[in-house]
């Protein structure tokens, strides 16, 4: 499958300050990528550079195998065949929904514009809203219209800059799934910028986790959660705690929670101090278990409780438990370890902080 987008070793500087460092990734036709990271990590700068609003100081960007940015050339945004969806939707308040969608189709015939707008209105689930005005729509409906307008000219790549940030938390993930479905129907290649991992997981095929202008890991959501490349990714994705341990064998680490079995990093020989990432799904509540822990915090999540548990050693871990197990603060509950993926970091590695 050919690459629709190739970003190759780009640096971006504002004056003497380097914002993006040696950043590379590619995206195949029809794939949805995501730049995920904390505020200020450079993800929007990357998006603006792909769009042509910023120019890399080194490296190059190719769209459909054609160089659009390098040190010598910078193809203007309007000539890159790129669509953009912004945080504020940017719909024209004096135009109807249909007129907004057709805004980028001014070179098309009236018949073609009508056909394309009707096609997109049906796709976004708003076939009867052609003559409505933006102020008559909900926030979610306005977002769908903004998406339809960006998709109308059939761009090579669609760029989405924090498109759900103004929505309620409960609506963001739902909209991300809906937008994914629409993009897949049109086989559109897209890049989402977000700081919200739930949006990223709901929408993207592949995710670049960024920090301080550098891609920390480019992977699937599953691998980011279960096989983080470093401590920053482990800390930023999902929830968990770091527990100290000691390698006692090729595939065994001794911790205050007991011996944990699994692959350890190359070079970590017996006697090597390490840190182990413990996810909430690694600690299973089991009333018949011999080991117990004390409930110190609890967060109700509908189908589950997220319990913070204090072990006899004083270490606190988290456990995700079905909500029919309703335990109170200071109550002792039975637990057992159930590791499918052992995530271990050498002790010498510096811990990165969550945003």
Image (cartoon, rainbow, N blue to C red):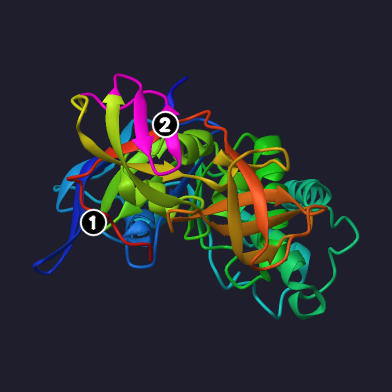
In reply to whether residue 263 is colored magenta, the answer given is yes
**Is the C terminus in the top left, top right, bottom left or bottom right quadrant?**
bottom left
Residue farthest toward the right in the current orientation of the protein: 128
Sequence order check, earlier mark of 1 and 2 = 1
CA gap, disc 1 and disc 2: 52 Å
Where residue 305 sits, quadrant-wise, is: bottom right
Query: In terms of secondary structure, where does tag 1 sit?
Result: loop
Query: In terms of secondary structure, where does tag 2 sit?
Result: strand
Q: Position of residue 128 (x, y in %)?
A: 91, 60
Q: Residue at position x 49%, y 54% from top?
A: 312
Is the residue marked by circle 2 packed among few (<14), some (14-19), or many (20+) residues within 10 Å? some
For disc 1, the marked residue is 55
Compared to residue 343, the image places residue 256 above or below, namely below
Q: Position of residue 130 (x, y in %)?
A: 84, 63
Give the extent of the magenta segment: 249-266
Q: Residue at position x 28%, y 30% from top?
A: 247
In front: label 1 or label 2:
2
Name the one closer to the observer, 177 or 268. 268
Name the one closer to the observer, 19 or 288. 288
Name the one closer to the observer, 31 or 227. 227
Residue 259: mark: 2
Left or right: 25 in relation to 333: left
In reply to whether residue 45 is colored magenta, the answer given is no
Left or right: 92 in relation to 61: right
- Whether residue 145 is visible here, answered yes or no, is no
């Amino acid at each position: 499958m050919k690459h629709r987008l190739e970003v190759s070793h780009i640096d971006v500087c504002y004056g003497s300050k380097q914002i993006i460092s040696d950043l590379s990734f590619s995206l195949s036709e029809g794939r949805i990528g995501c730049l995920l990271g904390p505020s200020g990590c450079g993800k929007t700068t990357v998006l603006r550079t792909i769009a042509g609003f910023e120019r890399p100081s080194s490296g190059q960007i190719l769209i459909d195998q054609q160089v659009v940015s390098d040190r010598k050339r910078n193809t203007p945004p309007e000539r890159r065949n790129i669509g953009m969806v912004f945080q504020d939707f940017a719909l024209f308040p004096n135009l109807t929904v249909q007129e907004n969608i057709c805004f980028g189709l001014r070179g098309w015939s009236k018949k073609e514009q009508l056909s394309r707008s009707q096609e997109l209105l049906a796709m976004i689930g708003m076939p009867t809203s052609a003559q409505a005005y933006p102020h008559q729509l909900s926030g979610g409906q306005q977002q769908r219209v903004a998406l339809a307008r960006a998709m109308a000219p059939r761009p090579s790549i669609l760029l989405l800059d924090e498109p759900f940030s103004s929505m309620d938390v409960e609506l963001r993930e739902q909209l991300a799934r809906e937008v994914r479905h629409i993009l897949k129907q049109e086989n559109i290649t897209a890049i989402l910028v977000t700081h919200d991992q739930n949006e990223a997981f709901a929408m993207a095929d592949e995710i670049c986790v960024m920090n301080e202008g550098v891609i920390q890991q480019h992977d699937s959501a599953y691998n980011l959660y279960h096989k983080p490349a470093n401590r920053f990714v482990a800390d930023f994705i999902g929830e968990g705690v770091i527990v100290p341990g000691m390698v006692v064998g090729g595939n065994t680490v001794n911790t205050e929670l007991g011996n944990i079995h699994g692959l350890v990093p190359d070079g970590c020989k017996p006697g090597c101090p390490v840190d182990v990432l413990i996810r909430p799904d690694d600690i299973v509540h089991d009333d018949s278990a011999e080991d117990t822990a004390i409930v110190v915090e609890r967060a109700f999540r509908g189908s589950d409780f997220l319990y913070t548990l204090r072990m006899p050693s004083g270490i606190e871990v988290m456990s995700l438990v079905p909500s029919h197990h309703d335990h109170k603060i200071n109550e002792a509950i039975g637990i057992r370890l159930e590791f499918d993926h052992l995530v271990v970091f050498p002790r010498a590695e510096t811990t990165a902080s969550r945003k």
